[in-house]
Amino acid sequence: MQEQYRPEDIETQVQLHWQEKQTFKVTEDTSKEKYYCLSMLPYPSGRLHMGHVRNYTIGDVISRYQRMLGKNVLQPIGWDAFGLPAEGAAVKNNTAPAPWTYDNIEYMKNQLKLLGFGYDWDREITTCSPDYYRWEQWFFTKLYEKGMVYKKTSAVNWCPHDLTVLANEQVIDGCCWRCDTKVERKEIPQWFIKITDYADQLLNDLDRLESWPEQVKTMQRNWIGRSEGVDIVFNVADSEEKLSVYTTRPDTFMGVTYVAVAAGHPLSLQAAATNPALADFVAECRNTKVAEAEMATMEKKGMATGLYAIHPLTGEKLPIWAANFVLMDYGTGAVMAVPGHDARDWEFATKYNLPIKPVILAADGSEPDLSQEAMTEKGILFNSGEFDGLNYEDGFNAVADKLVALGVGQRKVNYRLRDWGVSRQRYWGAPIPMVTLEDGTVVPTPEDQLPVILPEDVVMDGITSPIKADPEWAKTTVSGVPGLRETDTFDTFMESSWYYARYTCPQFDKGMLDPAAANYWLPVDQYVGGIEHAIMHLMYFRFSTNCCVTQV
């Protein structure tokens, strides 16, 4: 007997034994308790790193332990193979994304085997395979038929030199990563899925996820962002125009001193038509992408439009300012500003010398000192006319009821959650299965024409998607009528939103899922991955599951 452990001998022999005996291959067995341990599938970047090793070791230890308890354990693995990095690597290495990706998969697969993880390799999936993405294309067409899909214009990063759309990662300090040209914001048609139709269900179902970490559930609750408030309509002075805002603090309504609108708001554009300085400011804002998460820390900038809104209760004229902290994509693209009781509004008002009016008493009953900061705590109303002396809840309801009675307000539940934009103007992704016919009618690709296959033998120039550059690829017919295929591809979250279910039946060719296999293995008993995926990935993960149950 050897005294030393020699991994190069022992591990090779054992792993060969596992492979020959198919030790980790599993099938549905109703006589045994099942256990589904899933680790987040890797992106085939080229080489495993220690983060991969840590993640997959955790999953493997759990799987082996559950197997020792006598359970029927499913531990699968696959490849999240689509995505922008493959395009950049292909251009850099003078190849196409497909061979680069497949080479990486083979190398990383061998690494995983050498690490000795107990995967059922018969269930391996690769998301760039037509056998896989045909079913998400099919799923998308079913959602379209149920009214869950629509197309609208939305802003993207546009390089005026290369005449192409850029991903956020390709914009560096406001310039194109390739040619250093200043990037513009451009509105183009894109596809969306109505995840907002499921906002309440996604929120309420979090209470049913008893084994989920509270941190993850809290992050998802905040992302959905349910709030109760009031939609308020302001008349615009000397105009037939009206301005709508949403507020969760109607109790502070008597403290409004100005209204801020997004650069892309119709009133901003209207005023900019006769004001060159404002037009320049609007252009600057519209060409600067700002994420909602950056709003709190970014420098607040604005410019007076010269327009005024009329306060519905006092008749006071309130200046309307175009501001960079208001996003057209969120709410109505306009906010009522109460600088006495909102930190952002206070910062802006202080910078531009706008009035600051306190309407909530401090905790000790005194008038708050607003010289250094806003007082954001709730309290007793004052300086508010007929609403003086009311607490937060009573003030909220009294002001809301008054606005509703006057026909200028409506109680409303709002959500921070926005519909899922699934269009990507890149090549290496699953083609969106929609067709525009000769007469302009847009229809889903018929089921018997799925999958819409992405050509893999292409030449990458780093600028234009090969399927956008090739007019022949887009040509097709639907029921004998000529049309053009959609040349956008799916957001890669589409692939990762349902892969966990496909692992239960990866070779099933009669549908998206085999009901018997899916019902046996699901739900996942243990999911292993990073907290950075707690919001987007897991939200789409839960949404797709809901849609599979209710829409397909």
Image: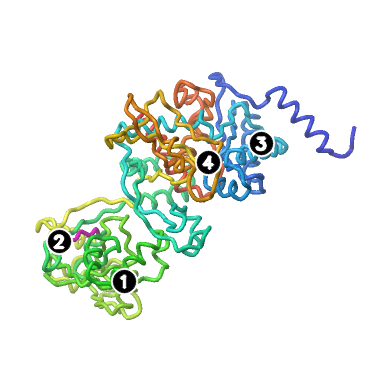
Looking at the image, which is closer to me, 39 or 451? 451
What residue sits right under mark 3 in the picture?
Answer: 106
- Badge 2 crowding class, 10 Å Cα cut-off, few under 14, some 14 to 19, many 20 or more, is few
Q: Which x, y percent locates residue 487?
A: 42, 40
Highlighted magenta segment, given as a residue range: 242-246
* Amino acid type of the residue that numbered disc 2 sits on in the rendered structure: Glu
In primary-sequence order, the first of circles 3 and 2 is 3
Closer to the camera, 397 or 420?
420
Per the image, label 2 sits on a secondary structure element best described as loop
Q: Distance between the residues labelled 3 and 1?
A: 54 Å
Mark 4 or mark 1, which has the lower sequence index? Answer: 4
Q: Name the residue under label 4.
A: 82
Badge 4 element: loop
Residue located beneath label 1 in the image: 302
Q: Nearer the viewer, residue 82 or 53?
A: 82
Q: Quadrant of the C terminus?
A: top left
> At 55% across and 21% down in the image, what residue appears?
28
Q: Which of marks 3 and 4 is nearer the N terminus?
A: 4
Cα distance between the residues tagged 3 and 2: 62 Å
User: What is the three-letter code of the residue carrying label 3?
Assistant: Glu
Asked if the stretch drawn in magenta spans residue 244, the answer is: yes
Amino acid type, mark 1:
Gly
